[in-house]
Image (tube, rainbow, N blue to C red):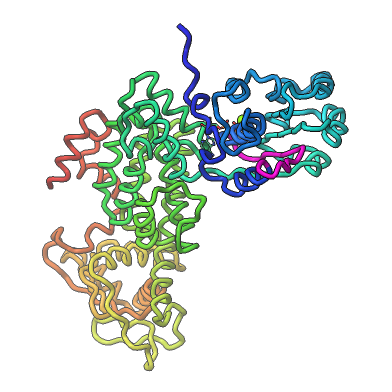
Amino acid sequence: MARMASLYRRHRPQTFADVVGQPAIVRTLSNAVQNEKVHHAYLFVGSRGTGKTSVAKILARSLNCVNGPTLEPCGECEACVSITNSTSLDVIEMDAASNNSVDDIRDLRDKVGYAPTREGGWKVYILDEAHMLSGQAWNAFLKTLEEPPPRTIFVLATTEAHKVLATIVDRCHRFDFHRPSLEQITTVLKRIADAEGIEADDRALAMIARSAGGSFRDAIGTLDQLVTYGGKQVSFEDVMELLDVADAETVFAATDAVIARDPGAALRRVQELSDAGRDPVQFMRDLTAHLRHLIVVQTLGEPPDSFSVTADQVPRLEGQARDLSQAEAVRAIDLLADAVAAVKDGADPRTQLELALLKAARPRSDASIEALLMRLERLEQGEPDGGAPAPAPPKRESADLPAAESEEAPPPAPALQGDLELARLWPAVLERVRESDGGEMMAALLADARPLTLEDDVLVLSYPATASFSKRKIEDRANGERLSQALRLVSGRPLVARFEIRDSEGDDHPGSAVRLTEDELIARFKSEFDAEDLADQHAGETAAAAEEN
Ligand SMILES: Nc1ncnc2c1ncn2[C@@H]1O[C@H](COP(=O)(O)OP(=O)(O)OP(=O)(O)O)[C@@H](O)[C@H]1O
Ligand SMILES: [Mg+2]
């Protein structure tokens, strides 16, 4: 049984009007045809599947149609049909990748001597992959290209213009084919689906377009594959399955989880991926690309045209770019890169993805980033940065440790916002203390303290009754100064630390979780979401259970 010609061959645009995008090229060539002022050598430059061969054939058909030259070749005459089928004697398609020797070119040169078969017709040579010709071959061709016989046109098509000899480029009219947008690819897919009676919903087509990397041909090829193996009903799930890529929705949702600092939601996204049989590493790459997009949008203020996003994704992309700070985006990209590297070294892909998302989604405890971010945020809000070490020695009143502030301290900044700020602040302070000279000992004393509240620049810390020794030591003057410094460095303003003894060390302390180390935190998340289960097949139930909690 003869296999039907592939979709992309059957659905090449037939006239200039059918060409989607590339308006400048279409306009210039249309004018040339209409005025019969066609140049004898064109260089079509563009990445694969952007329409170079198609436009070359349209040009040939427009010139050679019985009604030609015309912008509406009939598509039925001998010339039109034979050009479409690549059997025309006047339109010669040559692949330079396989015919790149000097002999091939001499052969071509000899053929160029024959006049077109039809009076008034043109000979059109379409030389694909032109950059593959050897230097010698080009030299053999140069003369012909310079002075071709009348009514002869060369169209050199290449994906890599820089590999074509400058002397050749100089002799051609050059056209650059742009990568199509997602919308343009979807338009072409819709047109083909309608013509073929293929039923594919918008989501499915958008997904195919997104995966095509700016190539009409690849998009059409994917549709072809789907139809060949699954029939004319093409669902979004079919596309997902064939492409093995995460859909935009999951990428957006995972980013939302990071923005919302919702590790549970992040894990559920991984679960969905896993249920759909997606490749975690591919997802990491997709998510990385998305985060990079966010940074670009943050920088430019809007998505550049080169982004393949659908119109309805633009507001969402802009929203995420607003909600995720650049530092957080960079950090998430780093975490994902580490995860991909770990997988290359043999680590389990799913676990790595989970860890990367957990880390990206939970409050940070990296002191340096934390401290910098908080200070930057404050500076951005136009508040004074009190981070520089203060010249005046601290005063001491009762058990309160005054911050290193002078009499004319800046006006009190608005209170940091609740538990989240506290959770962000405390680990960073601890790390500052630990880093300072001889700070190890002091950090050990502080390990028993739990941050309770942060209000009006007063940070209240509690010690259990059993740790009253630690409390006394920490209230010692030298230690107090060191703590004030750390607080100031991290928060960017003078904070006062006050210590209390609490009988029970209840877990209702707002900042109680923040003493955990990174590994402990992850272990805790894992146990809260029952990650032993998550790691295997039944994780769906656990994730659902976690959601109910
Ligand atoms: N601008 C376009 N408008 C509509 N369809 C297009 C366009 N460009 C390409 N296509 C579709 O994509 C298919 C591949 O295009 P074409 O062969 O012309 O690309 P190309 O640039 O020559 O690629 P390559 O570098 O791989 O040879 C065509 O059959 C056509 O269906
Ligand atoms: Mg081509």
Say whether residue 147 is left or right of residue 181. right
Residue 240 in percent (x, y) is at 35, 32
Range of residues picked out in magenta: 33-48
Say whether residue 224 is left or right of residue 399. right
Q: Considering depth in this image, is 199 or 450 the residue closer to the camera?
A: 199
Say whether residue 86 is left or right of residue 432. right
The residue most toward the bottom is: 408
Q: Residue at x 23, y 66 (%)?
A: 419
Asked if one can make out residue 489 in the rendered structure from this viewpoint, the answer is yes
Residue 377 in percent (x, y) is at 39, 71
Locate ligand 2 by image quadrant: top right
Instruction: Say if the magenta span includes residue 167.
Output: no
Residue 224 in percent (x, y) is at 43, 24
Residue 124 location, quadrant: top right
Instruction: Say if the magenta span includes residue 43.
Output: yes
Number of marks present in the image shown: 0
In the rendered image, the vertical position of residue 136 relative to residue 503, given as above or below: above
Residue 264 in percent (x, y) is at 24, 47
Q: Considering depth in this image, is 143 or 504 the residue closer to the camera?
A: 143
In the rendered image, the vertical position of residue 190 relative to residue 510, given as above or below: above
Asked if one can make out residue 50 in the rendered structure from this viewpoint, the answer is no
Residue 470 location, quadrant: bottom left
Q: Considering depth in this image, is 485 or 398 the residue closer to the camera?
A: 485
In the rendered image, the vertical position of residue 301 relative to residue 113, given as above or below: below
Q: Quadrant of the N terminus?
A: top left
Q: Considering depth in this image, is 273 or 232 the residue closer to the camera?
A: 232
